[in-house]
Amino acid sequence: MIFPKLSVPDMNESKKNSEFGSEIAWDFATNQPVILNGEIQTVSGVDALRIWIEKALRTERYKWSAYKWSYGAEIEKTLEMGLVGPALNHALQQSITNALIYHPHISQVGSFNFKPIKDQLEIEFQVKTILDDTVEVNLIV
């Protein structure tokens, strides 16, 4: 046979997965990488973007010299301002949006919903990608 048979993956799925790159799979409950059979696992596509979003929101901007100043959110700083109610919600929305919107694969951050829970605040919002995927995010501060 002169020409071997090749199996070509679905271009749409392949493009989606390569578009977002890959990330180390992360267990945020234990704050450690996911290890299976002794190997660190990776994820790609929208799952990689989900991990990037979570890490960016958990990293306080300007606090760690290992990161560029454009990386991370100013959530701690915003909470320390002493704002309450709608003023706090607006400031947190702005901080979250500023932390995420510069990512080249994120086109929009919106649909914010704030719910007070005892002495914490639950923030739900959506992140839209350049490929029209929607990532639902739930953050408790």
Image (cartoon, rainbow, N blue to C red):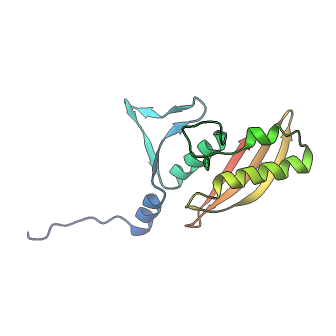
Image x and y of residue 100, in percent: 64, 54
Q: Nearer the viewer, residue 130 or 46?
A: 130
Image x and y of residue 110, in percent: 73, 60
Image: 61 above or below 8: above
Tell which residue pokes out farthest to the left in this image.
1
Asked whether, in this view, residue 128 is left or right of residue 36, the answer is right
Figure disc tally: 0
Q: Residue at x 86, y 46 (%)?
A: 88
In front here: 84 or 7?
84
Classify residue 10 by image quadrant: bottom left
Residue 108: image location, x then y, percent: 67, 63
Residue at position x 61%, y 45% in the image: 56
Residue found 44% across the figure and 63% down from its top: 13
Residue 100, above or below 16: above
Q: In this orientation, which residue lies closer to the viewer: 36 or 95?
A: 95
In this picture, residue 31 sits left or right of residue 75: left
The answer, for residue 88, to whether it is visible in the render is yes
Farthest residue toward the bottom?
2
Q: Which quarter of the rendered picture does the N terminus lie within?
A: bottom left
Q: Position of residue 51 (x, y in %)?
A: 56, 45
Residue at image position (43%, 59%) is 18
Specify whether residue 121 is in view: no
The C terminus lies in quadrant: top right
